[in-house]
Amino acid sequence: MMTFKAPAAVLAAFSVIALADAGHAGESYSGGATCSTQTNGSGTCSGSFNGFLASADPNAYAAFWNEGTAYGVFVAELNGNYYSCTSTSPAEPWFALSAAPPTTSFTISWTSAGTCSVLWMEAGSQFK
């Protein structure tokens, strides 16, 4: 069996680097807001709720709704365009996003038929 022993100088350097990281407490985060559609009608929206609120578009918004586990709807408006998709079997992150803090990042994609196809989310305490 091969083992690795780090020299004391390497360990000391990592200790200094770890102490030098002040963390992200108090950091302000908008996450941005972007949406796009392809010519076939499929599309993607990414960002955070704060990102849509902070957009230069005063009418921008993004929302996730669900009716139990049977139905979900995503809607957004950005730069004068409306985006939406529906799901008859929303993934678990859907329910988390319905009650998520505004700093939660998400990406949602939909098919040309308007069916939500991919949902990704990230939340963390480092985002204020």
Image (spheres, rainbow, N blue to C red):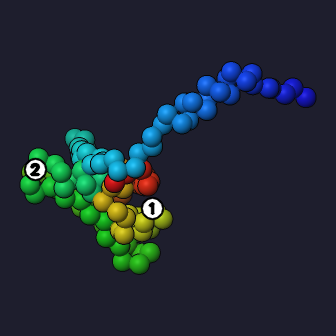
Q: Is residue 22 above or below residue 11?
A: below
The residue that disc 1 covers is: 93
Pinpoint residue 27: horizontal percent, then vertical percent.
33, 47
The picture quadrant where one finds residue 65 is bottom left
The picture quadrant where one finds residue 34 is top left
Q: Residue furthest bottom?
A: 68
The residue that disc 2 covers is: 57
Q: Is residue 19 above or below residue 69?
A: above
The secondary structure type at the circle numbered 2 is: loop
Question: Which residue is nearer to you in this view: 16 or 102?
Answer: 16
- The residue that appears at 41% across and 45% down in the rendered structure is 24
Decide if residue 86 is on the left or right side of residue 96.
left
- The residue that appears at 30% across and 48% down in the rendered structure is 29
Pinpoint residue 48: horizontal percent, then vertical percent.
30, 53
* Residue type indicated by callout 1: Pro
The secondary structure type at the circle numbered 1 is: helix
Mark 1–mark 2 Cα distance, whole angstroms, equals 27 Å
Q: Residue furthest right?
A: 1
Tell me the quarter of the image containing the C terminus: bottom left
The picture quadrant where one finds residue 93 is bottom left
